[in-house]
Image (spheres, rainbow, N blue to C red):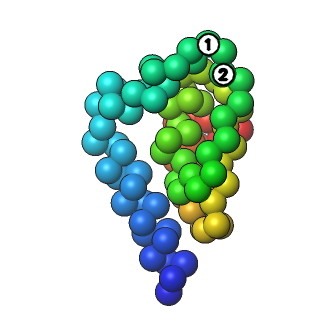
């Protein structure tokens, strides 16, 4: 089904993200004044791999929005595994 395909995409994206070294994974966070970040909104977030470094490094409130509701399940599991379930 189409939903299964998008969920599989999100799982593949997370597996690919897991291969990144810290420099690549934290690249966006390191390019800004992360100390000033309180909230991050990612529209079209997929599984949330771009949000994760902000949650890990800045403690910001991270909100992801995507048309594929099923990727929210995948993203929430990713954040849970990192101890960032809230």
Question: Where 18 sits versus 59, above or below?
Answer: below
Mark 2: few/some/many CA within 10 Å (<14, 14-19, 20+): some
Q: CA distance from mark 2 to mark 1?
A: 6 Å
| Proximity of marks 2 and 1: CB atoms separated by less than 8 Å | yes
Residue depicted at 45% across the width and 29% down the height: 28
Residue marked by disc 1: 35
Q: Total number of numbered labels? A: 2
Q: Quadrant of residue 22?
A: top left
Q: Where's residue 21, x and y in %?
A: 29, 31
The crowding category of the residue bearing disc 1, from other C-alpha atoms within 10 Å (few below 14, some 14 to 19, many at least 20), is few
Residue at 45% x, 20% y: name it: 30
Q: Is residue 22 left or right of residue 86?
A: left
Instruction: Kindly identify which numbered label has been placed on residue 37.
Output: 2
- Residue name at image x 56 percent, y 29 percent: 54
* Element type where label 1 sits in the image: helix
Camera-side residue of 32 and 22: 32
Residue 63 figure quarter: top right
4 lies above or below 75? below
- Residue in the foreground of this view, choosing between 15 and 49: 49
Q: Position of residue 34 (x, y in %)?
A: 57, 18
- Image coordinates of residue 3 in percent, x first then y, are 54, 78
């Amino acid at each position: 089904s189409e939903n299964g395909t998008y969920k599989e995409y999100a799982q593949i994206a997370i597996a690919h993200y897991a291969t990144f070294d810290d420099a690549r994974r934290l690249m966006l966070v390191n390019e800004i004044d992360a100390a000033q970040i309180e909230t991050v909104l990612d529209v079209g977030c997929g599984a949330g791999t771009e949000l994760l470094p902000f949650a890990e490094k800045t403690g910001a409130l991270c909100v992801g929005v995507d048309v594929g509701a099923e990727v929210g399940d995948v993203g929430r599991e990713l954040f849970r595994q990192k101890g960032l379930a809230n």
